Amino acid sequence: MISKAVRLARVDTGAELAAALLLMVSYPLIVAAALLPSMWLFVTAGAVSYISDWYLHQRGTYLINRLSKARAGLSIRVLTRELIVILFLARTDMGDKSLYFAAIVCFLSFYALQAPHSALLTLIRNRRKLPFSTRNIDLNGLWIPNAPSYRLTNRAAEKMLHLDLAAMVGLMISAGTDNSVYGFVGGAVTLLLATLYVVALLPYLGPKRLPANTDKALEFIDEWLRAYKPTTVLFFSGSADSAYQVNMWLETMAELDGRPLVILRERFILPQLADTAVPVLCVPGAVHLMNMDLSSVRVALYPANVGKNIHMLREPDVKHVFIGHGDSDKLASVNPFSKAYDEVWTAGKAGRDRYALADVGVRDEDIVEVGRPQLARIQAGTGEVPADRIPTVLYAPTWEGWTDEPGNTSVILAGEKIIRRLVETEPPVRVLYKPHPFTGTVNPKAKRAHERILTLMAKAAAERAADPRFAEPAAASAADQSAARAELARIEAALAALVDSGSQATDDAEASRDAAADPERVTKAAALRDEWNAAYWRSFGTWEHRTVSGPMPHLYDCFNVADAMVSDISSVVSDFIATGKPYAITDSAELGETEFKRQNTAARAALILDNKASRIAELVTAVTDVAHDPLRAARGDLKDYLLGPDEPSSLVRFNTAVNDLAANAEARLAGQRLAGEPAARTEAV
């Protein structure tokens, strides 16, 4: 019941739900206390109102946003409390009625100060915004002074409005003691603090406190581009939840020959960007981007098919390549928009055949098989589970997708059945649930099914902890698990200390200025993450069910500890095939095994599950007994077909493809120069 109420209220925890309920209840109680009038009820309800409001803001509860949409935002809530105080004073038989009128004047003046405060914050924010944001680019030659203190800008409206607390306390003391001095002093303190807050912001609008203007900033970045001369660009645009699509290519970009550059189009992607020493340039404005000097770029790589790609695709001197963010049999892998690129790079021959079958206009000669450089960290399975532990089965479904077709995800129709059969199977297995980060963002049914799976996993974990069969190993490993948890805390503290100074900046201009490239720090952070990953898996038993969410541990780390996987048709399956381990795919659209395997290449070496997950036992048998793993040879053949050969390595093949295409672009430009043709670059519109 409580968990359902938490979901309905759009809060994350029971404590947030309690605070939200207290906030709602406090206002009618304050009104009742004012009408009675009752001093102690008024003070108690008022204190509850302030504390619960503050707590919900501290937690960043989504309910706060919803209250604003319902015209019950913070300003309205504060004003309502102040009006109720006036009502309370009117109902209280105070000897000095001047305090009543002084309270009205105080609150009117207090609200008069909100306008300049809000205007100043908006002006400072807008005038400090550069036309671009950067990481790992030296901006020392560009004038970017320090931003206002974080204490002045963080949750500024909340801080300003809650300055009325001094006046409220003073008025309550006056009402209780019949001494007006306290009310006058409290009101004066509130107005003084609010005035000081406004005055403290004024200097940051001075010319010495503002960064260089747009023209100077763009001139500076053009000079940097001409000096750095980027040759290969990773171009990305996407939603706030899609940062993983660019993050998966950052390590590959860092390993390329030449001079790589990452170009982003949305500022909100920057804070989610993984550690990298590669220069990153975020340019939200299309006109600014199209006017930048990218004449040295020869190859542009695109991880996603999005509308903003057109702003880079219009560069005629650049060779444009769609590399995608995964290799699967989904329709997204054969998007007709792919024919807009000069080349399409796939992992193996399967990708080439997929485009041929789809017949969407991508020519065979424009497809290059480069493998999947990201898969280097995946460890191939040995085929046998060590005798000292039970098998681990990973359930890693994809999300419902924008098209919301029934075959996109197994979460809605089969997810609970898959988990239930796995946690109840004998001999026992350990279950890991790794949901897609987009799960439930489009279809509410997927969200609800995901939440039921989380509940089921929590229940199964509790039952496993009470299972007497695991009492002995639990006792034997308790000390090691405790040490691993301590190690996790140490590593997390070390990682926090390594966070870029730019990420601690007050605004984006300051963050760009301070986020200089530090390859040594990036290397150290990567080593710490490897240590964290090892400690994470040691921090709980190899028999304990676990939901794995968030960026750490990585999906590939889950691959390495799993002995088998259940998933959907997505790049997750194609990547897991690199392990050589057994896997199952759910036919959520109920096409039937024959048709499902005909339509989906990655399913050829998979155990096909219906929406009842009735064949889960076969997957467990394939893991526990190699002799009963009939698809083992087929997985080896499919691995070569989907991902290409092991030698040369995928990174070598990818780098070679970049160099060859860059040479092609350079030769074309050289031919134009010899022919005396004018530069092909078009003017921005």
Image: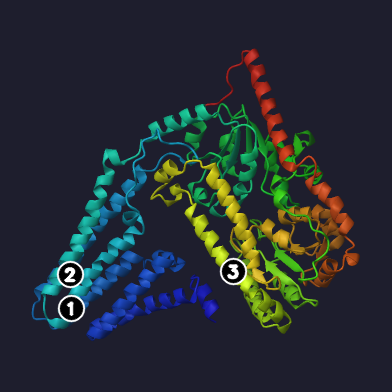
Q: Nearer the viewer, residue 168 or 524?
A: 524
Q: Position of residue 156 (x, y in %)?
A: 33, 58
* Amino acid type at image mark 3: Ala
Please say if 136 is above or below 490: above
Callout 2–callout 1 Cβ contact below 8 Å: yes
Q: Position of residue 106 (x, y in %)?
A: 17, 66
Whether residue 382 sits left or right of residue 154 in the image: it is: right
Whether residue 190 sits left or right of residue 162 in the image: it is: left
Tell me how far mark 2 sits from mark 3, CA to CA: 53 Å
* Amino acid type at image mark 2: Gly
Q: Residues within 10 Å of mark 2 (few under 14, many from 20)?
A: many
| Residue 492, numbered label | none
**Circle 1 SS class:** helix
* Amino acid type at image mark 1: Ile
Tell me how far mark 2 sits from mark 1, CA to CA: 10 Å
Q: Residues within 10 Å of mark 3 (few under 14, many from 20)?
A: some
Please say if 405 is above or below 366: below
Residue at image coords 60%, 39%: 234
Task: Tell me the residue that label 1 is attached to.
Answer: 173
By what rule are the colours in the image chosen? Answer: rainbow
**Circle 2 SS class:** helix
Q: How many marks?
A: 3
**Circle 3 SS class:** helix
Q: Nearer the viewer, mark 2 or mark 3?
A: 3
| Residue 186, numbered label | 2
Lower sequence index among marks 2 and 3: 2
Q: Nearer the viewer, residue 127 or 518?
A: 518
Tell me how far mark 3 sits from mark 1, CA to CA: 53 Å
Lower sequence index among marks 3 and 1: 1
Residue at image coords 82%, 66%: 623
| Residue 483, numbered label | 3
